[in-house]
Image (cartoon, rainbow, N blue to C red):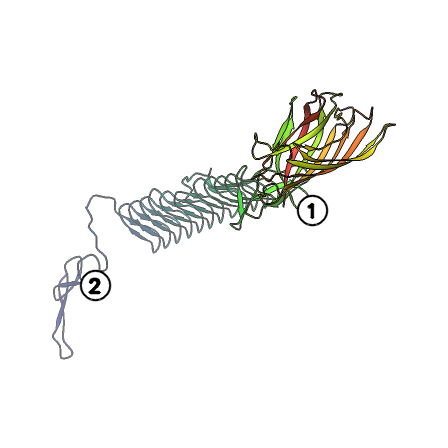
C-alpha cells in the first residue's frame, strides 16, 4: 500500500502510516503482532518452513506447536502432536489427546483423556471414565475413578468397575463400586471394599483388609494381618499369629506378648499354655520343662496310661536345673499325702508322710493306670520354682486306678511337698516310677504346662 500522511492538529509533528505487506508501519517502524518483531510482542517462533504447522479449526481454538491440532470449540492444543478435539478441551505434551468435552490431557506418550471432564496427567496416563482422574502410568476407566502410579495403563489394573473406585500403587486394582485399593498388588473387588497394604485383598461388600497379603472375604468383615504375620497394637503389644484351641482366651505377659491360654476359673489368675508333651510310645520316664519366668506353674496330666497292670509301683518326681541334672540327695524332699480308695471291699483312707527323701512320692498304693481302670489324671501346682531364697513348693490332686484295690478300684490322692535343697533354678520335672516293681512304663498320656500370672 502507499503511505498516508496525517496532518498535525496540535503542536506535534505529522506522522506517516504505511505497510510493508506484513506489518503496519508508523514512520517506517512496524507495530502490533504478526511476528514482525516489533515490541511489545509476547511470543516468538522459529518455523523451519517444512514441518506440519499447527492447526486450529475449532471456533476460538488455539494450537501451538508442530503438528498440534485444536479442532474442538474453544480448545487448546500445545506441543508436538497434541490433539484437543473436545469442546473446551486442553491437550499438552507429545501426542497428548483430549477428545471429550472439558477433558484435560497433559503429558507425553499419548496421555489420553477420552471422557467428559476426565483428567489425565503424566506420561502414559489414561482417563476414560467421566470425571475420572489418572496420574502417572495409570488407567481410570470408571466414572469418577481415581488411579495413581499403577505402572500399567490397561483396564486390567487401576480404577475400573462400576463407579467411583480408587487405586493407588503399582498394579493396584479397584473394581468394586466406590472401592479403594492402596498398595502394590492390592485388590478391592467388593462394593465399597477397602484393601490397604501390599497384596491385600478385599473381595466382599464393605469388607476391609489391612496388611501384607491379608484377605477380607466376608461381607462387612475386617481382616488385619496376613497369615503368619504379627499385628502390633498401639506400638505396645503383639497379637498371636495363630488361633488357639477351643475355649482358650488371649492373655498378656505384661511385656508386649499376647498368647492364647486356657481360661482360668474363680479369679485364680490367667493361664498361659507353655508346652504340650504327648506320650506316643512306651518310655521309662518323662521330662517336662517349666519355660518362662513365672512364679507359679500348673502341670495338667490327662489319659496317663501305663503298660503293666501289676507293676507294684508308685509315681515319683524330681526337680532339676536342666533336662539332665535333678536333685536326688538323701534329704532333698519332704511330702505328705492324703488318700482315699473306693470301689473295693478293702477300701481304705489314710495319710502318708515322708521327710528327707530323694524324690517326691505323688501316689499311694500300686498304680494301675490302664484304660480298663480309667487311666490317671493329675493337676499339679508349682510355686517359687525359680527362687534362690525360698524352697520350691508342690501341691497336687490325682485320680488313678489301684492295682492293690482290685478291679474298678480307684484312688484319689491329695498331696503337698517341698524341695528342701535350694537350687539355683527349677526348670524341669522328671516323672518316673518307684517301688518294688520295674515293669511299669509310660505308654500314653498328655502333659500340659501352664504359666500362671
Query: Is 203 in front, or is 208?
Result: 208
Q: Give the x, y percent position of residue 48.
A: 19, 46
258 relative to 152 in the view: left or right: right
Label disc, if present, on residue 268 of the rendered structure = 1
Vertical placement of 153 versus 92: above or below?
above
Find numbered disc 2 in the image and state the secondary structure of the residue it sits on: loop
Quarter of the image for the N terminus: give it.
bottom left
Q: Position of residue 27 (x, y in %)?
A: 12, 67
- SS for dot 1: loop
Question: Where does the image place residue 195, in percent across and percent down from the top left?
Answer: 52, 44
Assess disc 1: are there few (<14), some (14-19) or many (≥20) residues with their C-alpha within 10 Å of its C-alpha: few
The residue nearer to you, when weighing 8 against 70, is: 70
Residue situated furthest bottom in the rendering: 11
The quadrant holding residue 283 is top right
Position of 142 with respect to 18 (left or right) is right
Say whether residue 178 is visible.
no
Quadrant housing residue 38 = bottom left
Residue nearer the viewer, 291 or 412: 412
Q: Looking at the image, is mark 1 or mark 2 earlier in the sequence? A: 2
Q: Are marks 1 and 2 in contact (CB under 8 Å)?
A: no
In percent of width and height, residue 240 lies at: 57, 41
Q: CA distance from mark 1 to mark 2?
A: 93 Å
Q: Which mark, residue 72?
A: none
Is residue 101 positioned above or below 354 on the image? below
Can residue 45 be seen here?
yes
Number of numbered markers: 2
1 vs 2, front mark: 1
* Residue that numbered label 2 is attached to: 40
Front in this rendered view, residue 303 or 84: 303
Can you tell which quarter of the image residue 228 is in? top right
Amino acid at each position: 500500500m502507499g503511505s498516508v500522511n496525517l496532518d498535525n492538529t496540535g503542536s506535534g509533528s505529522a506522522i506517516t502510516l504505511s505497510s510493508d505487506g506484513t506489518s503496519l508501519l508508523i514512520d517506517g517502524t512496524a507495530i502490533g503482532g504478526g511476528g514482525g518483531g516489533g515490541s511489545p510482542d509476547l511470543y516468538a517462533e522459529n518455523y523451519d518452513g517444512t514441518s506440519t504447522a499447527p492447526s486450529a479449526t475449532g471456533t476460538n481454538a488455539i494450537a501451538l506447536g508442530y503438528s498440534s491440532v485444536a479442532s474442538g470449540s474453544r480448545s487448546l492444543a500445545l506441543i508436538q502432536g497434541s490433539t484437543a478435539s473436545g469442546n473446551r478441551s486442553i491437550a499438552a505434551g507429545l501426542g497428548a489427546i483430549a477428545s471429550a468435552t472439558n477433558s484435560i490431557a497433559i503429558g507425553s506418550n499419548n496421555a489420553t483423556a477420552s471422557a467428559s471432564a476426565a483428567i489425565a496427567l503424566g506420561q502414559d496416563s489414561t482417563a476414560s471414565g467421566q470425571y475420572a482422574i489418572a496420574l502417572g502410568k495409570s488407567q481410570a476407566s470408571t466414572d469418577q475413578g481415581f488411579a495413581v502410579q499403577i505402572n500399567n495403563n490397561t483396564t486390567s489394573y487401576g480404577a475400573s468397575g462400576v463407579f467411583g473406585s480408587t487405586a493407588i500403587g503399582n498394579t493396584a486394582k479397584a473394581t468394586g463400586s466406590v472401592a479403594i485399593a492402596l498398595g502394590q498388588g492390592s485388590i478391592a473387588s467388593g462394593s465399597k471394599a477397602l484393601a490397604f497394604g501390599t497384596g491385600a485383598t478385599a473381595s466382599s461388600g464393605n469388607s476391609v483388609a489391612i496388611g501384607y497379603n491379608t484377605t477380607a472375604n466376608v461381607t462387612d468383615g475386617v481382616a488385619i494381618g496376613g497369615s503368619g504375620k504379627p499385628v502390633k497394637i498401639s506400638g505396645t503389644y503383639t497379637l498371636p499369629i495363630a488361633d488357639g484351641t477351643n475355649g482358650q482366651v488371649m492373655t498378656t505377659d505384661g511385656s508386649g506378648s499376647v498368647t492364647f491360654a486356657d481360661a482360668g476359673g474363680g479369679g485364680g489368675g490367667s493361664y498361659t499354655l507353655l508346652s504340650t508333651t504327648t506320650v506316643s510310645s512306651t518310655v521309662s520316664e518323662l521330662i517336662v520343662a517349666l519355660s518362662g519366668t513365672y512364679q507359679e506353674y500348673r502341670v495338667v496330666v490327662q489319659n496317663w496310661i501305663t503298660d503293666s497292670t501289676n507293676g507294684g509301683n508308685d509315681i515319683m518326681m524330681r526337680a532339676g536345673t536342666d533336662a539332665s541334672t535333678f536333685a536326688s540327695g538323701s534329704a532333698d524332699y519332704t511330702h505328705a499325702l492324703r488318700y482315699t480308695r473306693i470301689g473295693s471291699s478293702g477300701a481304705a483312707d489314710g495319710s502318708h508322710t515322708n521327710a528327707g527323701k530323694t524324690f517326691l512320692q505323688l501316689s499311694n498304693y500300686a498304680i494301675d493306670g490302664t484304660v480298663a481302670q480309667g487311666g490317671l489324671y493329675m493337676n499339679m501346682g508349682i510355686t517359687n520354682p525359680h527362687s534362690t531364697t525360698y524352697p520350691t513348693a508342690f501341691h497336687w490332686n490325682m485320680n488313678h486306678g489301684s492295682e492293690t484295690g482290685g478291679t474298678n478300684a480307684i484312688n484319689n490322692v491329695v498331696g503337698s511337698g517341698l524341695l528342701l535343697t535350694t537350687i539355683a533354678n527349677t526348670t524341669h520335672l522328671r516323672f518316673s516310677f518307684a517301688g518294688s516293681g520295674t515293669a511299669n512304663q509310660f505308654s500314653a498320656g498328655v502333659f500340659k504346662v501352664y504359666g500362671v500370672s
